[in-house]
Image (cartoon, rainbow, N blue to C red):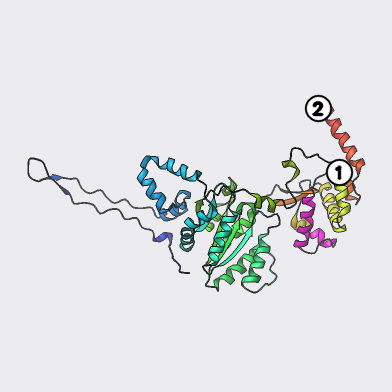
Amino acid sequence: VSWVSMAPSSLQVCPQEARSSTEVKHGSNSGPSRVKKGPPESKQEVPESFAEDYWMSPTTARIPCLPQLKEMLAQGGKAKECLAAAQTQKKSVEEILAGSKDRWLRRLKMGFNLLIEGFGSKWRLLEAFAQELQSQDLDVCCIDGFDATASLPNFLRQLLAQLFGHHRGIGSLEALVQAVLEAQAQDSVPLVLVVHNLEALPVAHQAALSSLVAGHGIWLVTSVDHLWAPLAWSSDMLKDFNFCREEVHTMEGYEIELQGKYPDGPPNWVDPFTVEVSSKVSMGLVLKSLTSNHRELVEVMAKNQLEGRKEGISMPDLLVVAEDRMIANNLTKLRRLLNELTDHDIAVQRQGQDGSTVYALVAKEQLLRRLARGEMPGADDAQCEDDEEDGSDMEED
């Protein structure tokens, strides 16, 4: 792969040379006459930050292809209508890739990272482009950010083990990023990371990914579907990402993303005809079918909420208690237990007041006290709490 270096500081804007102070005009009835012109205008200096502002502006990063530019210039005032008509024309993934792959590869070689936006699923498009990159003898790794079990640390561990042949048992995400950077610095072949739905990853993982792709020889090809995805990116992240935005409308459905987000089927709230079962009774049935580690973890979380931390408990704090009670001895096992509790709607994942991710049980105080004693909820608890809700509704009326 040939590298094309383009440093923003090397960009220079050279105004046209000033014409001479006289201009020759030819009249119809007389010979040529000289018309005096004023002094040439002084050259205006370009600000030193022009290059950075130019390349980092979102409008500049949306580089149109040459045929689009020619069409826009030829149509003049009808450019907006032409672009709107072109966007409504549905093309297959193969047609889109055939007309874009060479341009996208040039952007990557120039030092940009690709951000694919637009209406419709872009999973098949990015997968096809990843195969095209592999045919160019590049190292390509893909991760489905929309997957419910997706984890950037696990992805980086597998990357280190498969591509670089070593795994040192690195724990923290920052150490994993540094290890990949050090390993890639010794490799002359660029590493391409294909991330489906970047906005689905936690913000901390997105920040770590921006630091990773800012390193030498690491390219990023990613897609976003959420309208407000860029709001989670700080100025430093945008600088490290160095995105070249491509607007592509595939018009395809999101069946693959939906299957990855909800592997057990869509949640009940998307079906208006779903009959709601009492959560207390179902919680007791679910806890009886789970392991003792799940029940002990629920007991720990219930005690935590009764002690005053109603918003929930963070993963690091929960791991300390889980290790003391021999429920889980590492973060992977604890995350697996929590995922099963959240899948069965026993616990929920939310954002705490300090911005961290916390986990809490979906239960009221009376049920929490029973769970904290290690007892299973039953139909009596459900009837009791239903009576309380009915009583509160009558008082409001």
**Amino acid of disc 2:** Glu
Q: Residue at x 7, y 42 (%)?
A: 30
Q: Residues within 10 Å of mark 2 (few under 14, many from 20)?
A: few
Determine the image quadrant of residue 296: bottom right
Q: Residue at x 88, y 49 (%)?
A: 285
Q: Residue at x 62, y 69 (%)?
A: 179
Residue 185: x and y in percent read 55, 71
At mark 2, the secondary structure is helix
Check residue 104 in the rendering and tell me which mark sits there, or answer none: none
Question: What is the span of residues highlighted in magenta in the rendered image?
Answer: 320-345
Residue 387: x and y in percent read 88, 34
Look at mark 1 in the image and give the residue it sits on.
280
Q: Nearer the viewer, mark 2 or mark 1?
A: 1
Is residue 322 within the magenta segment?
Answer: yes
Look at mark 2 in the image and give the residue it sits on.
396
Compared with 116, 3 (above or below) is: below
Q: Kindly report the distance in space between the C-alpha atoms of the residues bearing marks 2 and 1.
A: 24 Å
At mark 1, the secondary structure is helix
Is residue 329 within the magenta segment?
Answer: yes
